[in-house]
Amino acid sequence: MHVFLTGIAGFLGSHLADRLIAAGHRVSGNDTLIGGYRDNVPTEATFHEVDCCDLDAMTRALEGVDVVVHTAAAAYEGLSVFSPALVVQNNVQASVSTFTAAIRRRVRRVVHCSSMSRYGDNPVPFTEDMPVRPRDPYAIAKVAAEELLVNLAQTHGFEHCIAIPHNIIGARQKYDDPFRNVASIMANLMLQGRQPIVYGDGSQMRCFSPIGDVVGCLERLVIGDDVDGLVVNVGPDEGFITILELAERLARVIGFSPLEPIFVEPRPCEVKLATCSAALAREKLGYVAQTSLDEGLLDIVEFIRTRGPLPFTYHLPVEIVSERTPRTWKDRLF
Ligand SMILES: NC(=O)c1ccc[n+]([C@@H]2O[C@H](COP(=O)([O-])OP(=O)(O)OC[C@H]3O[C@@H](n4cnc5c(N)ncnc54)[C@H](O)[C@@H]3O)[C@@H](O)[C@H]2O)c1
């Protein structure tokens, strides 16, 4: 099977590419490298440095493709409050152009990566049958992309499914990016001998998902024959940890001491507690949480140690600078 991954230089896209290549599939993909690393792309994959928003270039790239997995996104929930134009462009326009190119090329199936942010302030744990209640520009864009996919699939007749991953950790995540990936940011800081920065009091509760546990589920969505129309959370529903505890766990894994986190103002719109049910993923995709949090954190630490800790690059524009914009970005604290 020929599988095309948008965002193949990204964290999730590159791991899924490896998995599909190992299973004997032909893999190609595209990326603009705003959120990934060029050397994440497996050497066996054909790489197009093409923007998903470029409909004609995407149509050319999708020739002969059986399945498209759309992982490309500006996956910046916190930043989306201050850079909504960038985030909407690279989530809504990028998605609709990808889907349109897939329709033009008569691609059989599109597997789309959405986000847990779609659930907004629904009661936890989030289940797939809950109404979507997006609460920030990133979440609104992810929901718009989902709705476009479902609408186009119904009209033009192609298979589609929607994965909802959450808080994935592991090697290859962009760790010099000050705008996202809390565990990688903290690890990069500590490996530079610097204290981690925590928004608010650090009591935000999360449930992290080591990458190895996620790619198997996505592979099932690519090759499974009973997944058309499926919308499914992909990630753990146990093993909660606060952001402050995450800093402590990372410090232990790295051997960083003394840990004295720097606390800054909470970010607007940041949710305190967000957890998903994994019941449907267990039933439909054989999801099992096999990797421990410490193993996932060690994976990040070894990746950064191998490449070397890096200064943070403020590579994206902060479109709205006001008294509400976090100091971490306005004053470049990372
Ligand atoms: N990592 C997580 O915890 C998580 C959680 C929920 C949802 N997701 C979703 O999973 C998907 C993958 O996330 P990730 O963590 O691998 O992110 P990532 O940033 O590592 O990968 C996304 C890739 O898409 C590329 N990209 C962005 N805009 C593009 C465009 N217009 N054209 C081509 N390439 C473009 C980026 O350069 C990057 O390499 C995203 O859709 C994200 O919203 C991820």
Image (spheres, rainbow, N blue to C red):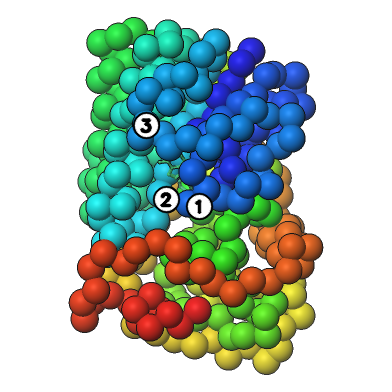
Which callout, 3 or 1, points to the residue nearer the camera? 3
Q: Name the residue under label 3.
A: 54
- Please tell me whether residue 141 is drawn above or below residue 184 in the rendered image: above
Left or right side of 245 for 269: left
Question: Of callouts 2 and 1, which one flags the residue occurring earlier in the amino acid sequence?
Answer: 1
Kindly identify which numbered label has been placed on residue 35: 1
Circle 3 — which element?
loop
* Location of residue 141 (image quadrant): top left
Gap between marks 3 and 1 measured at Cα: 18 Å
| CB-based contact (under 8 Å), mark 2 and mark 1 | yes
* Nearest the eye: 319 or 161: 319
Percent position (x, y) of residue 301? Answer: 72, 65
| Mark 2 neighbour class, 10 Å CA radius: few under 14, some 14 to 19, many 20 or more | many
- Please tell me whether residue 241 is drawn above or below residue 252 in the rendered image: above
* Nearest the eye: 247 or 68: 68
Q: Mark 2 points at which residue?
A: 75
Percent position (x, y) of residue 296? Answer: 69, 57
Circle 2 — which element?
loop
Q: Residue at x 24, y 74 (%)?
A: 321
Q: What residue type is labelled 3?
A: Asp
Judge whether residue 119 can be spotted in this image.
Answer: no
Gap between marks 3 and 2 measured at Cα: 19 Å
Judge whether residue 117 can be spotted in this image.
Answer: yes
